[in-house]
Amino acid sequence: GKGEFAHFMLKEIHEAPRAVARTLEGHVDWSRGRVAEGLLLPGGQRRGLRRLWLAGMGTAYHACLLGAWWVEQIAGIPARAVLASDFRDDPPREGEGERGLLVAVSQSGETADTLEAARAAQARGIPVYALCNVPGSTLARLADRVLMTRAGTEVAVAATKSYVAQMVGLLLLALALAEGEEGRVRRSQVLDGLASSVEAVSRSLALEPAMADLSRRLVRERAVYLVGRGPDHAATLEAALKLKEVAYLHAEAMAAAELKHGSLALIEEGTALLALSGRAHLAARLASNLREAASRGADVFVWTHLDGAPFQAARRTYRLPDPGHELLAPLVQAPPLQLLAYYVGLGRGTEIDRPRNLAKSVTVE
Ligand code: M6R
């Protein structure tokens, strides 16, 4: 049941720290400072790996965007996130998939598009590494290798804790794919960060009252815009999806640098602009994008864990906990933005746990 919580969504957001802890459990050999043997690909396959596709739909696709970034940053292997539907529509051509790997991400393991992508890969000799949350699901059964995210049962249609667990799973996968001396220091720093991630994710939930407060500012908006650079943009895509899905609020995420290439025309006095800033070396550039929007009247709200970030243009800056490593910033960004979507939905009187027109698992294409 929902216990003390008014909705499953709220309960499940609060279960994120446990989802992180359980997904790490047994997947990391802390004493040797590396991911567990079971996550590794057979030696030859791993060494020869030339490219990765990461495919999923909806929230899982957003996790894939981050996953591709992590694989490139941590393992140094070219990786591309694709919608599972696009992968199955236009699978790799003859030869293109050689020494490639498809990482298929799905909470339910039953999403039709993702299953079709996995089958299309296998038909071309591309092995499938699945990340899923439901043991014994169709995807888990057909994949060549499986990493179980252990978020536990997710009842609300909106993916919350399962997204956080997917991020952890993809980080573990990126670590599992990395090898050799090069990048060893970075890998151990990421692992150290993961060691404190349960705590960090749990501290991010302390923003709940502030998010409930901000929801009152947004509840009557007709549209909100979200911006970030690189992985922060991926995180805003997911935050926007939550606002659409559970609050029925038109929310559009864009790359911050894209604002002045067209969308800035939408900004008028009082337009709500939400921004994520997870990377120190990009803060100044983001700040300049935000200044430009604020000077056109945007009401800017920023989420960041960075000290002394230069966001004078913001009406409010919400301080996120230190993620332990910059690559892990998306882990602490997610829960507060999920809470925001929840409270905006609550204020708008939507069917939070079962939004209109949607199903938990989309088993038809
Ligand atoms: O079960 P899956 O992870 O394959 O589901 C994919 C999407 O349908 C799912 O993430 C959907 O976007 C969520 N309802 C979003 O909250």
Image (tube, helix red, strand yellow):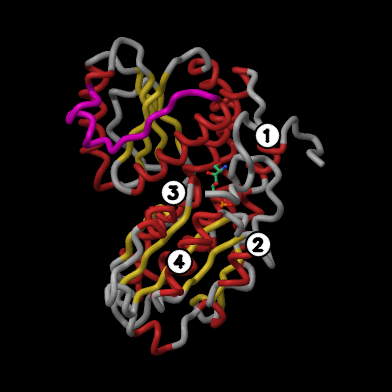
The residue that mark 2 highlights is: 22
Q: Count residues near mark 2 (Cα–Cα under 10 Å), then give few for <14, some for 14-19, many for 20+.
A: some
Give SS at disc 2. helix
Measure the alpha-carbon separation of dots 1 and 3. Answer: 20 Å
Q: Position of residue 203 (x, y in %)?
A: 57, 44
Above/below status of 74 relative to 287: below
Near-viewer residue (289 or 9): 9
Measure the alpha-carbon separation of dots 2 and 1. Answer: 24 Å
For the point 68% across and 48% down, the residue is 154
Q: Where's the N terminus, which quadrant?
A: top right
Q: Position of residue 30 (x, y in %)?
A: 56, 75
The residue that mark 3 highlights is: 62
Q: Considering only order in the chain, which callout, 3 or 2, is on the residue closer to the N terminus?
A: 2
Residue type at mark 4 is Val
Above/below status of 50 relative to 350: below
Give the extent of the magenta segment: 248-264
Q: Considering only order in the chain, which callout, 4 or 1, is on the residue closer to the N terminus?
A: 4
For residue 103, the mark is: 4
Give SS at disc 1. loop
Q: Is residue 39 left or right of residue 222?
A: right
Measure the alpha-carbon separation of dots 4 and 2. Answer: 21 Å
Residue type at mark 3 is His
For the point 34% across and 71% down, the residue is 75
Q: Position of residue 100 (x, y in %)?
A: 35, 75
Q: Considering only order in the chain, which callout, 3 or 4, is on the residue closer to the N terminus?
A: 3
Q: Position of residue 174 (x, y in %)?
A: 42, 68
Measure the alpha-carbon separation of dots 4 and 3. Answer: 13 Å
